[in-house]
Image (tube, helix red, strand yellow):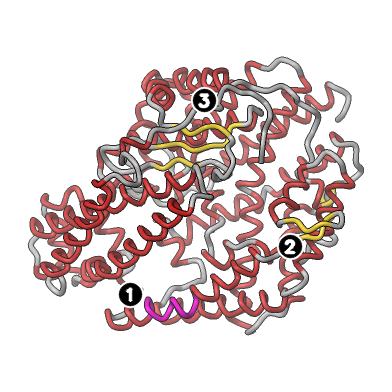
Amino acid sequence: MTTTEITGAEDVAWDLSDLFEGSDDPRLEADIEEAETAAAAFRERYYGKVAGLSAAELSEAIAERERIEEVLTRVGYFAHLHFATDMADPARGALVSRITEKGAALDTQLLFFGLEIAEIEDDAAESLLESSDLDHWRHWVRSLRKFRPYLLSESEEKIVTEKSVSGVSAWGRLYEELLGALRVELDGAETSFEEAMSKLYSADRDVRRGAAEAVTQALEPGLRTRTFIFNTILLDKSIDDRLRGYETWISARNLRNDTTDEAVEALIDAAVSRYDVVQRYYTLKAKLVGLDQLTYYDRFAPIGEDPSTVSWAEARDIVVGAYADFAQEAGDVAERFFTHNWIDAPVRENKRTGAFCATSVPGVHPYVLMNYTGDRRSILTLAHELGHGLHGWMAQPLGLFNADTPLTTAETASVFGEALTFKRLLALEEDPTRRLNLLAGRIEDSIATVFRQIAMNRFEDSVHTERRSEGELSTERLEQLWLETQSKLFAKSVDIDGYGTWWSYIPHFLSTPGYVYAYAYGFLFALAIFRKYEQEGESMVEPYFDVLRAGGSRPPEELAAIVGLDLTDPSIWKSGIDALSDELDEAEALATEIGLG
Ligand SMILES: [Zn+2]
């Protein structure tokens, strides 16, 4: 991706010296060595002895385990961030793989600690946890021990871990390599998969159709091999779940996400019962782009032209202003990212695409990477990443283990910050066409995050369930289940004829089964908090900050309770979806107003 627009973001580069002076900083090597020495000493001191520790001794051991993790995380963050701004530099790539290998080796060495904590008998564990010595680690220990009923013996766990390298991980890697090698024949030339997919955003329908057909064609070769790999991974997971005693295919994921099967079911039911929002939106969009009905390759077609570029300075004002309007403290933290060079903003050759926030380690602030192009979407991306930044900043005093959030609450501050900024953008815009474009973009993002993920979860649910009851699934059957779950989502609003093999390019299904619903969970949770803030105003500010300050030190249910929400009540999901539906109402009204509805 390149841009010729001058936005003022061109020289906005981050300063990584708060982590290390550079890849040749002698502290870096010294830290790696220190982590290795400390890990060896840790194993020597605690291996086989965890059950015999007093509460005070256990507390000390966890603190030391966390400290080792911190040392390595700091080195790892530096390597990854350093690499992200110039991925063509072999030295930067080499540093990343060296640190990754070191990290894996240390993990294996220290694996015993978590296992031994989980193996402590329930009664003994409860009396340990009653001690005030473990106040700081109580949630961390409890989260770890939730896996206790599903753990195998240490020697079995070792076999599972070691054999997975040549088993399920190898299959996963083969799948990724096959996907990576896909080439799309487009306009007589060979192009990458990403390049072809990006053409689905073209304003020219012929270009979109051509790209979609070329993608479908490119997915054809090797489909049977990919089907076989998918089946193998489905089988592997079913064996694993059976041996460990997980009730359903998704139970292990839910536990890891710090949530329950019931809460996730309520979320899924709520989203599935409101697929009408998606269908209404795509029906409206068809009118907006002048079609009778959208096909699957029209979903990302741009609505109207907005050639205006927003300068970096203006984006900064809008985002920091939105945060400061909410609370001065939030605005001040956001402002620091700009004044202290914690953001790497411009589009640059060989830089990582997309955007992320690295929340870093205690004592070091978070860093934000993005590819700022000056379109409206970039402003919301900036707001999103600064939300993660605010979250990381506020939770940091808890330390690495307690600040770390599960996937389900990781997006709280980012989605909230995006909602704040979107409201401001909308308030600044009076022209109905531009308001409509803003709303459409917002609704499309929400559909992608909530409903699309839930429809994908329904596909996963059907394939995992069927693999367990009926055995291997054929390519045709996978296609059928994919189209069934997609057509429930779109009904008549989108024609999906020709879309049948597109399940096979989504790596999440294989690499992290059950992953996708967490996007919807996090998004709707954050939106429910935002809606409450809109209703109650100022009085929600401190409770909201308390949620951020708690990081991952408390389960999602308790975090929700801080802001007066009940995660076991399905209406929480309904509230977030109602907010989307309200935005859609306004979009429909605007379309009528400008004569397009
Ligand atoms: Zn995010």
Please identify the quarter of the rendering in which residue 176 is found. Answer: bottom right
Q: Which label number is shown at residue 534?
A: 3
Q: Which residue occupies the foreground of this view, 342 or 145? A: 342
Please state which of the two labelled residues, at mark 2 or mark 1, is closer to the viewer: 2
**Pointer 2: what residue?**
183
Is 579 placed left or right of 548 in the picture? Answer: right
Magenta-tinted stretch: 160-168
Percent position of residue 348, x then y: 58, 37
Above or below for 496 versus 201: below
Q: Residues within 10 Å of mark 1 (few under 14, many from 20)?
A: some
Q: CA distance from mark 2 to mark 1?
A: 42 Å
Q: Quadrant of residue 179?
A: bottom right
- Which mark is first along the chain, 1 or 2? 1
Q: Is residue 166 magenta?
A: yes
| In this rendering, position of residue 362 left or right of residue 511 | left
Q: Name the residue nearer the viewer: 373 or 476.
A: 373
Residue 498, by quadrant, is: bottom right
Give me the residue at 65% from left, 83% from top: 472
Answer with left or right where residue 230 lies relative to residue 407. right
